Amino acid sequence: MLPLLLGTLIVLSVLLSGMRGAALLWHGGVTASALLAAAWQTPRPVLPCLAALCVAASILPLSWGLARLEDDPPRPGERTLCLAGGLACAVLAVVAVPRGLLDAAGRPALVAALAAILCGVLAAALRRSVVGQCAGLSAALDGLTLLAGLSGRGALLLGVAALQAALMLVAFVCLRRIAWARGTE
């Protein structure tokens, strides 16, 4: 089941990069599901479960804010560029992890994490609004959270959680300004 979830994460990273809040919510849900599936299969499930909780805590408010308040949806040209760039990033992630480097169980997880990181950075680079850029970087941090949760590195998970909190703060301030500007009109 875990390879299926990781494959779905790669596809969603490509297709949904640069879209609005619902896409980020779906992407985060698949990432959290992959982490929970990994926790189910390992003898030490604490770090993957904490990583899944970190993903959910960061994705839910950001996707809600994007869906409700952001006034800068991506244009069709941006979506096409994200799709083409996302496909290139996914191919790059597959090529970057050679078959003999990891066992058969670890390679899909590493490829999925790299694809999520690359597609998230691409989405952040192509977005015009600060909140959209935060959403793209949050998707990239999902890939890093996946790596931290699957590898069992607590220090990396704490660092990612701190980065997600900083992104949430920036996005919250920007969303608050958008909501305030709409309220005064």
Image (tube, rainbow, N blue to C red):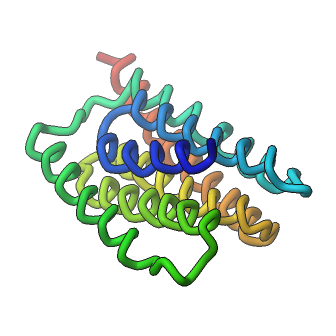
Q: Name which quarter of the figure residue 71 lies in.
A: top left
Q: Is 176 rendered above or below residue 48?
A: above
Q: Quadrant of the C terminus?
A: top left
Question: Picture coordinates of residue 59 (x, y %)?
Answer: 57, 38
Question: Picture coordinates of residue 18 (x, y %)?
Answer: 30, 45
Question: Picture coordinates of residue 74 (x, y %)?
Answer: 21, 38
The residue that appears at 56% across and 83% down in the rendered structure is 101
The residue that appears at 35% across and 44% down in the rendered structure is 132
Q: Nearer the viewer, residue 159 or 5?
A: 5
Left or right of 64 on screen, residue 44: right
Question: Picture coordinates of residue 142 (x, y %)?
Answer: 56, 53
Left or right of 50 on screen, residue 184: left
Q: Quadrant of the N terminus?
A: top right
Q: Nearer the viewer, residue 32 or 132?
A: 32
Q: Nearer the viewer, residue 121 or 148?
A: 148
Q: Name which quarter of the figure residue 147 lies in.
A: bottom right
Number of numbered labels in the structure image: 0
Q: Is 105 rendered above or below residue 101?
A: above
The residue that appears at 39% across and 17% down in the rendered structure is 183
Left or right of 108 on screen, residue 159: right
